[in-house]
Amino acid sequence: MTKLFRVTGIVSIGIALIIVLMELSYNPMRALIAGFFGTVNGLAMIALGDVIKDVNYLKEKLNIYLPGEVNKELPQVTCFKCGFRYDFDYPKCPSCGSSESSKT
Ligand SMILES: [Zn+2]
């Protein structure tokens, strides 16, 4: 994910530079505008990638999970009786109370 932003950012700056080089002799104003926005966009993409990386690092470090995100460190088991999925460290199914469960 971070890599994707970084690559997109670098590609964006690259395209901006190519446009500048191609347009400079024909339309210097357009070349400058395209170059400026392309570079800003590229840098923003790279910065965004870094921010996402930092957020992921912090989340891992502090063990924070956003709503809807499953804590992947805890293996899940499925209740035989009702099919409810729960963390393996529960002694019983939180839904129906059965202690029978499968690892899948
Ligand atoms: Zn159950």
Image (cartoon, rainbow, N blue to C red):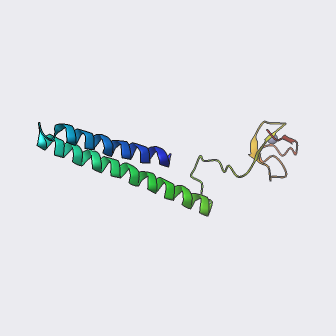
Please state if 61 lies on the left or on the right of 99 as rendered.
left
Residue 17 sits above or below residue 90 on the image: above
The front one of 84 and 49 is 49
The front one of 43 and 61 is 43
Q: Position of residue 11 (x, y in %)?
A: 36, 42
Please state if 55 lies on the left or on the right of 83 as rendered.
left
Q: Where is residue 5 in the image (x, y as percent from the top left)?
A: 43, 46
Numbered disc total: 0
**Quadrant in the rendering for residue 77:** top right
Which residue sits at x=57%, y=50%?
67
Give the quadrant of the C terminus.
top right
Please state if 30 lies on the left or on the right of 59 as rendered.
left
Which residue sits at x=73%, y=51%?
74
The front one of 26 and 58 is 26
The front one of 103 and 4 is 4
Which residue sits at x=48%, y=49%?
2
Residue 9 sits above or below residue 23 on the image: below
Q: Which residue appears farthest toward the right when viewing the image? A: 100
**Quadrant in the rendering for residue 38:** top left
Which residue sits at x=12%, y=42%?
28
**Quadrant in the rendering for residue 25:** top left
Please state if 24 lies on the left or on the right of 85 as rendered.
left
